[in-house]
Image (spheres, rainbow, N blue to C red):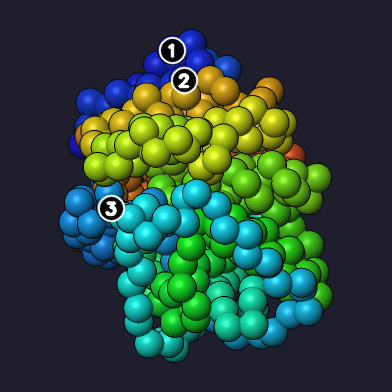
């Protein structure tokens, strides 16, 4: 049964409501209707289970996360300058590292190691499509590690994207211990090292940074610091105000004399980012409420910025609710930002090929 996806633009953000509950790609310039799309296949549903299984409290008690693995770099390691956010009661609340032994990368994936200090190495894993394809350097959320993306990564590859996941200190098989003061410096060292690795291995496609939940702080900081090196920024389930988020978790930073500028300061940084920006958020996110994403959208300094809200999705269920359209929406934003979107003839060819595949799947 065919299902129609209806998009509705609303000032600085776009909300999409679906009669089927599916997630649809959005165009910031106005509402569009899209061709029917099948519900996500069983395998994709299994790919998304890890997003839904996390205990919300455990995820909430963290705002920082993991992923990565294999080749050394000469990039200068980050130095440690302790900040008020490194107080033990704050660090224990924010960081919940998930340790895991190194795993064998799946077919087509490559592991990379990035040293960030004498006693700390960050693991990364690249799910590669092709050197000429766009690459997303991804900072994941708290409670996640590289193997969690071994089924999600190939979904990006199917959309003709390279997906490069990076960890944090103490997560997965990355070494060291996480600190608020090292999170963002490490992220910048890792970004530069991975860019060097990609260039040295012949990867020439457009470069994007993407962050989910805790990882939104890393992605925004990297995009703000090195925006001349990237084509665009993608934020999923990100936050604008650290003080408000941490207060929900039980600590009043303002009462401790800590200002927003002394935290991750995502709002202040995203205002300085002018590269194309794409924000995705769950309609019913209880950990990072929707207003946080709306604030990022409103404060973004980019002229080309889009926001999509996934109906019924919580903090960890965007892929589970959106299905294949989640990856398609990201791919369309990337193509548009990189100037490689197919023309109408190619889109028509792709649509007919998709119809043929659907018809073949329904044939007895």
The residue that disc 1 covers is 10
- Marks 1 and 3, the one that precedes in the sequence: 1
Asked which quadrant contains residue 335, the reply is top right
Quadrant showing the N terminus: top left
Q: What residue is shown at x 57% (from left), y 23% (from top)?
A: 299
Q: Residue furthest top?
A: 11
Residue 352: numbered disc? none
> How many residues crowd mark 1 within 10 Å: few (<14), some (14–19), many (20+)?
few
The residue that disc 3 covers is 61
* x and y, in percent, of residue 206 in the image: 73, 53
Mark 1–mark 2 CB contact (< 8 Å): yes
Residue 13: numbered disc? 2
Q: On screen, 282 above or below 110?
A: above
Q: What residue is shown at x 34% (from left), y 28% (from top)?
A: 290
In whole angstroms, how far apart are the C-alphas of marks 2 and 3?
Answer: 28 Å
In whole angstroms, how far apart are the C-alphas of marks 1 and 3?
Answer: 32 Å
């Amino acid at each position: 049964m065919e299902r129609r996806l209806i998009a509705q633009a609303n000032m600085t953000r776009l909300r999409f409501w679906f009669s089927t509950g599916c997630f649809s790609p959005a165009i910031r310039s106005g509402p569009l209707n899209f061709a029917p799309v099948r519900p996500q296949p069983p395998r994709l549903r299994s790919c998304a289970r890890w997003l839904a299984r996390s205990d919300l409290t455990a995820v909430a008690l963290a705002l920082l996360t993991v992923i990565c693995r294999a080749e050394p770099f000469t990039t200068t390691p980050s130095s440690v300058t302790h900040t008020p956010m490194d107080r033990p009661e704050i660090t224990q609340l924010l960081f919940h590292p998930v340790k895991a032994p190194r795993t064998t990368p799946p077919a087509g994936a490559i592991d990379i190691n990035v040293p960030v200090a004498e006693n700390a190495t960050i693991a990364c894993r690249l799910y590669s499509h092709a050197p000429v394809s766009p690459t997303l350097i991804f900072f994941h959320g708290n409670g996640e590690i590289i193997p969690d993306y071994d089924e999600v990564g190939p979904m990006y590859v199917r959309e003709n994207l390279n997906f490069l996941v990076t960890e944090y200190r103490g997560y997965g098989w990355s070494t060291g211990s996480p600190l608020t003061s090292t999170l963002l410096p490490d992220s910048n060292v890792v970004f530069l090292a991975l860019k060097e690795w990609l260039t040295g291995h012949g990867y020439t496609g457009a470069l994007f940074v993407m962050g989910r939940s805790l990882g939104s702080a890393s992605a925004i900081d990297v995009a703000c610091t090195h925006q001349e090196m990237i084509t665009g920024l993608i934020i999923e389930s990100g936050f604008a105000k650290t003080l408000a988020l941490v207060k929900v978790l039980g600590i009043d930073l303002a009462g401790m004399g800590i200002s927003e500028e002394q935290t991750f300061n995502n709002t202040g940084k995203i205002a300085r980012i002018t590269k194309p920006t794409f924000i995705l958020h769950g309609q019913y996110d209880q950990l990072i409420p929707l207003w946080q994403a709306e604030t990022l959208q409103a404060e973004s300094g980019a002229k080309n910025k889009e926001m999509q809200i996934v109906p019924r999705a919580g903090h960890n269920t965007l892929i589970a609710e959106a299905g294949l359209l989640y990856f398609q929406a990201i791919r369309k934003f990337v193509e548009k930002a990189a100037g490689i979107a197919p023309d109408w003839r190619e889109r028509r060819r792709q649509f007919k090929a998709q119809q043929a595949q659907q018809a073949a799947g329904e044939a007895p």
